[in-house]
Image (cartoon, coloured by chain):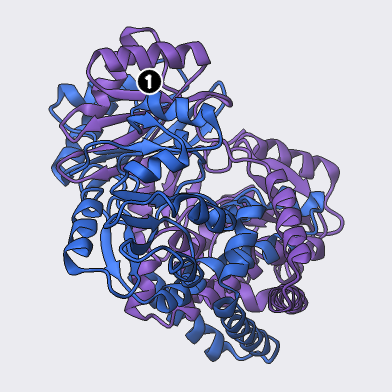
Chain colours: A purple, B blue
Amino acid sequence: MVHRILGSDRDTASLDKALEMGVIDQAISLEEGARQARLVFLCTPLRFYSEIINRIRPYLKPGSIVSDVGSTKEEVCRLLAALPEGIWAIGGHPMAGAETRGVQGADRYLFENAVYALTPLPGVPAPVLDFMVELLQSTGARIRFMEATLHDQLVATVSHIPHLTAVALVALTEGKAENLMMAAGGFRDTTRIASSNPELWEDILFSNREQIVPHLDQLISSLAVIKEALAGGDHDNILRLLHEAKAIRDKIPRVRRGLIPDFCDIICIVPDQPGIIGALGQILGHEGINIVDIEILRVREGDGGTIRLGVPRLEDAEKAVTALQRQGIKAWTR
Amino acid sequence: MVHRILGSDRDTASLDKALEMGVIDQAISLEEGARQARLVFLCTPLRFYSEIINRIRPYLKPGSIVSDVGSTKEEVCRLLAALPEGIWAIGGHPMAGAETRGVQGADRYLFENAVYALTPLPGVPAPVLDFMVELLQSTGARIRFMEATLHDQLVATVSHIPHLTAVALVALTEGKAENLMMAAGGFRDTTRIASSNPELWEDILFSNREQIVPHLDQLISSLAVIKEALAGGDHDNILRLLHEAKAIRDKIPRVRRGLIPDFCDIICIVPDQPGIIGALGQILGHEGINIVDIEILRVREGDGGTIRLGVPRLEDAEKAVTALQRQGIKAWTR
């Protein structure tokens, strides 16, 4: 479906990298790109949308589509409404990302199984929507049409409020050395998002503040209820809240990592020596066992580490443990 | 230093597994274990401490040490104070863990670089403390003596409050299908702890509620400040809060994963075919390049996935990319 991808960026080094990686076919000016494109994606922070829309609007071809990948949709749809008649505006938000920025973070499978929200403006013809869906489905994303307002409510709950909570949790440590020393474990993961780009998030938060403010009120009330239950010694209520949260959290679809959906885990203790990961592959390969997942769990420098291996079936796991033990590697199924 | 490890558990299947894994040398009753041990570790939920201490106290040898691995220390030290004279009580809390429970989750490197807090009761002689430190350091943990109260303040900030926050964030979704659909990405990671064992956490939270309640008040105030800034359009304040949180968060020590501390990342796109992980190891091994870190980033079933490989030096990375490309595998340095 895609014949040519044109890329425009203020930063020519990014364009060079994108060309080298084969992510774009040609680097081009914004205006010339708008003139040629059948479909335009805006992929900048929200604060640049107005300027970009103004610059491209005189050049867009009738019947072309303008979409975006921004984190809020109500304000974006308002901005896209300024496009001339005969241009189809479809707001978009792929709910996937990584901590890496720019084209270096490109990943062919980034959108695989990710929800991709589309918020078309009124009047976009069905064949245009079909074209868009077919194109985006080729990334492996799960396309969901929704109202811009509903989208913004949902991301307030699952993204913006958690972001602000991470900011408040980090602030609670006051940056004190003794707090940070204790914070190296789970706290680091929980608050990862507080390390994001502040300017980008300033845009997002203010763009969606109408949804965020009432949800933040709800969170504050909910924390106050927890506080009262704890202070008042209300064991039943705390236990109920913990159970309810667990029940909901356990329902959230798992993001799959290994190369097959279900597999058995083996834990093995390996020495810290060159080529050990390749050696594990060889030992299992020799037995005809396919490693479908692998993770380095923990390591001690100059000593060794524990590695988790995923293999397709329980019988593979048992065979693998035997083969590894035969090579002097401590291993067991988990 | 350790001659024999005796294990006692209500669940004989756990004892069998521990014996099979070589985690303990012998399964034994609580009373007989107490009679023989030089050092006892209590490793149960807090609610069982009283009962266990009562059961073992008549049998403990003079000069033996009783320690624990519980998540709060002030209440634990109060309970340990009931031990007879001549028994040395040293509260302990290794700040490491995994989502796995029981002996199956055993990992020789679990405590590597983890902070291990010790809260000895008054009067424990220096040689006894030295013995304890030397023993625990052999796990790779970083031992820190601290007051039980300070410990409980610190874990309230970096563990208990984040736990309650995850519970409240999950509750905010109300378990609605549309919320959960959008929540599969970052939200899932951020709220992982809300899936923990409710009974275990009920114990921990009430055991430390004196510290948790005021810190929860602080968090609520901090969220209220954020809400006012957003509602009032105070961009400067929001941007300042985001920057401050990022600065603190970026200071938290990184938990090392790869087999050497610094390395270069390669991203490669691999087909979903048996033995591919072993093949990567072989291609790089053939070039004399050591894989020191490996992570499956994303996959598409029946198609392929992206894998991150860590190699020691930039020149290794460049050589690896060339070697992989020669085998028809799309690869680049990140």
Foreground residue among A208 and A180: A180
* Residue A280 position in % (x across, y down): 29, 22
Residue at 39% x, 35% y is B307
Q: In which quarter of the image is the N terminus of chain B?
A: top left
Foreground residue among A151 and B7: B7
Q: Is residue A276 left or right of residue A306?
A: left
* Residue A219 position in % (x across, y down): 72, 73
Residue at 22% x, 51% y is B135
* Crowding at mark 1 (Cα within 10 Å: few <14, some 14-19, many 20+): some
Q: Which residue is identified by label 1?
A: B276
As drawn, the residue found furthest toward the front would be B58
Q: In this view, does A217 lie to the left or right of B158?
A: right
Foreground residue among A139 and A284: A284
State whether residue B213 is above or below residue A306: below
* Residue B204 position in % (x across, y down): 57, 63
For badge 1, the amino acid type reads Ile
Q: Is residue B200 visible?
A: yes
* Residue B290 position in % (x across, y down): 18, 33
State whether residue A215 is above or below residue A135: below
- Quadrant location of residue A326? top left
Q: How many marks?
A: 1
